[in-house]
Image: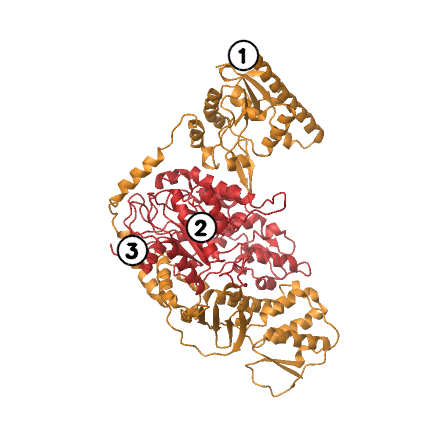
Amino acid sequence: MAKQTLEQKLAILSDAAKYDASCASSGSTKRHSRDGKGLGSNEGSGICHAYAPDGRCISLLKILMTNFCIYDCSYCINRVSSNVPRARFSVDEAVRLTIEFYRRNYIEGLFLSSGVIRSPDATMSDMVQIARKLRHEENFRGYIHLKTIPDASPELIEEAGRLADRLSINVELPTDAAVKQYAPEKKPEQIRRAMANVRITKDASKDKSFSGKRPPRFAPAGQSTQMIIGADASNDATILGQSTRLYSSYKLKRVYYSAFSPIPDSSAKLPLIRPPLQREHRLYQADWLLRFYDFQLDEITSVTRDGNLDLEIDPKLAWALAHRAVFPLDVNRASREMLLRVPGFGVKTVNRILTTRRHRSLRYEDLSRMGASMKKARAFITAGGWTPGGLTDSTDLRARFAPPPEQLTLF
Amino acid sequence: MHRVSLPAIGTAKAWREAARAFLAAGVPPEQILWGDHAAAPDLFGEDSLPRAGGPVSVPRSFISMAETAVWHSDPERFARLYAFLWRLKDAPHLMADRGDPDLAKLRQMEKNVRRCQHKMKAFVRFREIGTAEDARRSFAAWFEPSHQTVEPTADFFVRRFSDMDWRILTPDVSAIFERGKLSFQEGHSKPDLPEDAGEQLWITYFQNIFNPARLKVKAMQSEMPKKYWKNMPEAAFIPQMIADAPTRARAMAEAAPTLPPARMAQVQAQLAACDSAWDGPAEELPKAIRACTRCPLHCHATQAVPGEGPASADLMVVGEQPGDMEDLSGRPFVGPAGQMFDNIAASAGLDREAAFVTNAVKHFKFAPRGKRRIHQRPERSEIEHCRWWLDAEIAQVRPRLILAMGATAAQSLTGDGANILSRRGKIETGPDGLPVLVTLHPSYLLRLPDPAAREKATADFKHDLVTAAKLIAEAKQSPGARPG
């Protein structure tokens, strides 16, 4: 085989990396290189430098170090039984690409993942070497996200955490049974143990020693994980149950849901489907309600009988339609907790309502100026000059929001 | 009538100074004509600022809003800001009234500018213009922002790219950073920037990171509007990528499964060899416990926590189940209840290090509550399943005495978990006829709200530990009494 050029390698290894949904570059420590001695900055909030036509943002250079892999996970393009072309970046190549892209303002940093080659430790230590060279030789102060290999040694994970802003380990599928079926070499208990270790090390890095000295920072942007949606038969209640457990056990910053997407050279064990994009979207909405709107898991998943989210309307609206007895709410009197439950009101809108109503009572027109989506909210609130009348309890309320019914076709 | 025309560079500072002077002199908004550098000289009024009056005070939140909104391209921005400032003079609380139409409009302008700044940070694309001999590398970009965002955004690029020279040229104001110094210049026409080798790699990356099976063109355009495309090298390829996507997705779906490559068998044989490399009977038990899937608890806990201690300990201490800390660290008795046990054991003269400590149930059972995990009592069936491991540990350690702490341990060891308070301090018969001393669980002490009751329970617990220490000492006096 002829030697691959850098461009050919980049094509293969970015193609192999695109099934990882995460591209966040936010939430890390603020740093800059005003001193002229390094390259890059981190402002706390992330920046998306481009968007691909699949609607996903491109914030980081997302590549695999290599797509050779000894595992045989049915859903994965890089599994050992797949015939996709293989490539491998040298340490210098990965570093050079990152730096040159960064200088042209294409990216916020590097997201490095890898297939498992030789052994987990060997793979992890090569990845750490790339991060080390970026930080110590190139004085790179941008963002680094490292995917950790679950059974790599704790010392390597610790060094990875000191170099990177974020670490992540994918739980891959919502249940242990599904992991066993589709990723036979991966061990769910080992993945959880790895996440627990990251949490412990991160917690320990916050404790000052008796002399007041801080231990070195460890993965300041925290850890995240990803679950593939729609490859196995788990319902949304199971998926969200798994993610609430992950959030509470390992203090994850994010659980990413990735609709199972067709891959080139797919496995016979896992037939391809159209990626359930709408379901993925609803899961993210539910995830937000759980984390920022004080909803409990069973409130969201008990709305439908089969434990799946309503695909036609968002989960907050679905909850409100099933609990019309608590509506309409008076925006001039209702508590913060209840205002957060109004469809069409976000956290920012609710904060604005609370500050403004300290000075005067709110009218309907005020609410749309405050950023509320009144098309949704109007049926569930009363305000100065507005009462929904029979709208709240009308039988066709759901039909106003759901997409129009479609004629079935015979063919 | 007063007339003010503000410069294109340093607009924010100039507006602020003018507004302060007008406000101090009490000039109402309708008597001022605001214009920027692009506005034609007006027929009326004169360019003059009133002589400053007294000091004026303005809410800080207004200043931060004004310093952003002033960069908006709307010619009315200066007048709108001043008119609202005039209203604020008598009603400072207006800043908190998000429903006020004037404020809502200004906040909207502020938001537009912030978004424009954000897009500038994201979509500026540098090309290298220097040569290999230069001491510092240098880059240039051509950019067309919707608002006057170059000046307020330039510092971002300084913070990020201080070790190189760069210039961002735009039709209005251009930022130039050379040898560590930032300067602004007015107006440039589109320069002819040289080809850049990095750009081809970037386009390759952009094309390959795209997943043709999930086309969401609207989502892309709402975040990356078409007006920016002309200055982004990768955007030229978007129409073709969209056009090819359905065909590529169909090809993936229709492709027949292929035979795995030849090297697969070899790779998997190596993997299997790695898996069975472990050996050694003393370590067999903890490893087997860690791999346990006998009951559903293993699905949610991090790991099973096997017991720890000398392999031939005289005393075995059995708790309920791992807690939050034990579950994370994989070691028994390291959480708050374990520390409590250690302290009381030390004061009771019980040698903690010489005891084998373990739990009746090896996995943590909990319910997630927000960011915390709430302990849940294991069910009888879970205790039964885990008995198997506890029996194995007892058979290996063969202790002289077992201390059963709490209802779950008592349930597991004696088959009865009720009435612990009345049973504590007494010796009962456990598996293989071993003596089992029943006592309270230390977490019970931690949970008691009433200080008096807690003191009493702690004293009882300590008393039981003293009893245990005494029994061990006596048993050691009569050699050969070791059971099993």
Query: A177 above or below B89?
Result: above
Could you tell me which secondary element the residue under label 3 belongs to? Answer: helix
Q: Nearer the viewer, residue B266 or A400?
A: B266
- For label 1, the residue is B479
Left or right? Give the position of B324 relative to B239: right
Left or right? Give the position of B439 relative to B248: right
Could you tell me which secondary element the residue under label 1 belongs to? Answer: loop
Q: What residue appears at the point 56 percent right and 43 percent down from the top-left corner? A: A204
Residue B139, horizontal then vertical, whole percent: 44, 70
Residue B478, horizontal then vertical, whole percent: 56, 11
Mark closer to the observer (1, 3): 1
Dividing the picture into quadrants, the one containing residue B35 is bottom right
What is the C-alpha distance between the residues marked 1 and 3?
A: 80 Å
**Mark count:** 3
Dot 3: chain letter: B
Which mark is drawn over residue A146? 2
Q: Which chain is tinted orange? A: B
Considering every residue shown, the one lying at the far right of the view is B54
What is the C-alpha distance between the residues marked 2 and 3?
A: 33 Å
Could you tell me which secondary element the residue under label 2 belongs to? Answer: strand
Residue A314, horizontal then vertical, whole percent: 48, 52
- For label 3, the residue is B250
Left or right? Give the position of B144 relative to A361: left
Dot 2: chain letter: A
Quarter of the image with the N terminus of chain B is bottom right
Query: B13 above or below B261?
Result: below
Q: Which chain is tinted red? A: A
What is the C-alpha distance between the residues marked 2 and 1?
A: 58 Å
State yes or no: discs 2 and 1 in contact (Cβ < 8 Å): no
Which callout, 1 or 3, points at the residue further toward the start of the chain? 3
Q: What residue appears at the point 70 percent right and 81 percent down from the top-left corner? A: B50
Which mark is drawn over residue B291? none
